[in-house]
Image: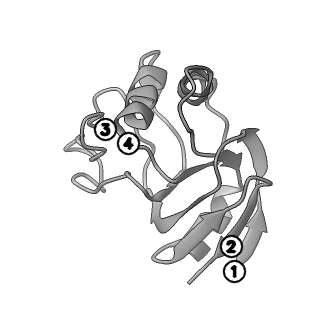
């Protein structure tokens, strides 16, 4: 399986296990920036780590602090290997942009149609700097 996503924020190509979220998530209060674990007890994937994963986001639940949480994840070394979003979230993606401006290595973020997410579930996935998304293992 392969697809090509639209680059939202350039970054380091990433590879890791796909984590396809089944529900939108709030990074503020929903993800622990110190560990990378999903902390929202109401979220279906609560307890799973987003660290080092190719994170498929069907949507986000807005908070102006989401960018700060993502930036903290990058700084702490617990960011996803890559982000694949159904819809761009300017507030969330600002965290990657600021982290890059701080000189930190950031993962690539791409936009891809949500109906293709399930094809990557449970697989090792690589997201290239050009937006190419492919099963790698």
Q: Is residue 99 left or right of residue 86?
A: left
All told, the count of numbered labels is 4
Nearer the N terminus, badge 2 or badge 3? Answer: 3
Q: Are marks 2 and 3 in contact (CB under 8 Å)?
A: no
| Quadrant location of the C terminus in the rendered image | bottom right
Residue shown at 60% from the left, 28% from the top: 100
Residue at 57% of width from left, 70% of height from top? 125
- Where is mark 1, residue-wise? 1
The circle on residue 134 is: 2
Relative side of 2 to 56, left or right: right
State the CA–CA distance, disc 2 to disc 3: 26 Å
**Element carrying mark 3:** loop
Q: Nearer the viewer, mark 2 or mark 3?
A: 2
The residue tagged 4 is 77
**Would you say the residues marked 1 and 2 are in contact, meaning their CB atoms lie under 8 Å apart?**
yes
Badge 1: few (under 14), some or many (20 or more) residues near its Cα, within 10 Å? Answer: few
Local SS, label 4: loop
Question: Mark 2 Cα within 10 Å, few/some/many (few <14, many 20+)?
Answer: some
Mark 4 burial class by Cα count in 10 Å: few <14, some 14-19, many 20+: some
Which of the two discs, 4 and 3, sits closer to the camera?
A: 4
Q: Percent x, y for residue 129?
A: 74, 53
Instruction: Give the Cα distance between marks 4 and 3.
Output: 14 Å
Identity of the residue drawn at 56% across and 52% down: 82
Q: Earlier in the sequence, mark 1 or mark 2?
A: 1
> Whole-Å distance between the Cαs marked 1 and 4?
28 Å
Residue corresponding to mark 3 = 31
Q: CA distance from mark 2 to mark 4?
A: 24 Å
Judge depth for marks 1 and 4 and give the one in front: 4
């Amino acid at each position: 399986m392969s697809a090509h996503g639209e680059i939202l924020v350039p970054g380091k190509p990433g590879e890791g296990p796909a984590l396809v979220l089944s529900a939108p998530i709030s990074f503020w209060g929903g993800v622990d920036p110190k560990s990378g674990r999903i902390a929202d007890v109401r979220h279906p994937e609560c307890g799973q780590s987003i660290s080092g994963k190719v994170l498929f986001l069907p949507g986000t639940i807005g908070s102006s602090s989401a960018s700060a949480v993502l930036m903290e994840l990058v700084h702490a070394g617990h960011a996803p290997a890559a982000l694949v979003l159904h819809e761009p979230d300017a507030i969330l993606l600002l965290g990657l942009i600021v982290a890059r401006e701080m000189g930190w290595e950031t993962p690539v973020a791409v936009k891809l149609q949500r109906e293709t997410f399930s094809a990557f579930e449970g697989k090792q996935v690589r997201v290239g700097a050009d937006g190419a998304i492919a099963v790698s293992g």
